Image: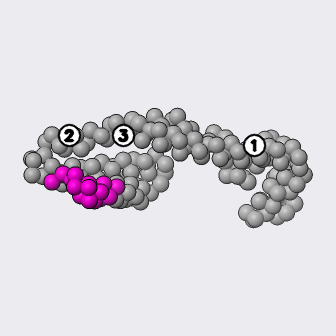
Amino acid sequence: MAVGEYVSVSSQRDAEQADIGREKRELMAEPQAKMEELAMIYVKRGLEKNLAMKVAEQLSAHDRLGAHMRDELGIDQVDLARPMQAAWISAASFAFFAGVPIAALLVAPAALRIPVIAVLSLVSLAALGAFGGYLGGAPLGRASLRVTLGGALAMAVTALIGRILGVSVR
């Protein structure tokens, strides 16, 4: 899980870095065109053209690359993707929440183990989804539902494959 997260977030970081590199080259090669491009972004947001150019000039005087990254590319330097952080969080979450089905296996009566494991796993996924939504400032219900449905789908597909291969647990 952690390796997958690292690879995914590294790809995102690579794309961000490529965009930043391209922006740096364009700023060096065509500074006036880039200034006008930035001003047009502000015009599209509702500023009058002269004011938009003044805003572009002032922001560029303070941090030219930062202004373009933020307003043209939608990238904030402090919010760049962090592959190692994502990998560690994924590893810790996976290790901690792997205990849920194990605990269910140990406490559930033999006849109810599979349904209890599934239900407790889905409940923990719902809680984890809501927590992720809370941390990200997203609606808790939507975040929780997305993670829960994804987990339920993964469980169903896994069970179906096990049944097709004749290795399902009953």
Q: Tell me if residue 155 is in the magenta stretch.
A: yes
Q: Quadrant of the N terminus?
A: top left
Could you tell which of marks 3 and 2 lies nearer the N-terminus? 3
**Which of the two residues, 101 or 162, is positioned nearer the viewer here?**
162
Q: Residues within 10 Å of mark 3 (few under 14, many from 20)?
A: few
The residue at the point 56 percent across, 38 percent down is 82
The residue at the point 32 percent across, 58 percent down is 157
Please say whether residue 89 is visible from this viewpoint. Answer: no
Distance Cα–Cα, label 1 vs label 3: 35 Å
Q: Quadrant of the C terminus?
A: bottom left
Which span is picked out in magenta?
A: 154-170
Q: Which amino acid lies under the numbered mark 3 shown in the image of this protein?
A: Phe
> Residue 47's quadrant in the figure?
bottom right
125 relative to 47, above or below = above
Q: Residues within 10 Å of mark 1 (few under 14, many from 20)?
A: few
Distance Cα–Cα, label 1 vs label 2: 49 Å
**Which of the two residues, 56 or 150, is positioned nearer the viewer here?**
150
Residue 32 percent across, percent down from the top left: 90, 52
Tell me if 26 is positioned left or right of 129 in this view: right
128 relative to 148, above or below = above
The residue at the point 48 percent across, 42 percent down is 5
**Which of the two residues, 98 or 57, is positioned nearer the viewer here?**
98
Secondary structure mainly formed by the magenta segment? helix
Element marked by disc 2: helix
Distance Cα–Cα, label 3 vs label 2: 15 Å
- State the residue position of label 3: 94
Tell me if 169 is positioned left or right of 13 in this view: left
- State the residue position of label 2: 103
Q: Which amino acid lies under the numbered mark 2 shown in the image of this protein?
A: Ala
Could you tell me if the residues under marks 1 and 3 are in contact, i.e. CB atoms within 8 Å? no
Tell me if 120 is positioned left or right of 8 in this view: left
Q: Which amino acid lies under the numbered mark 1 shown in the image of this protein?
A: Gly
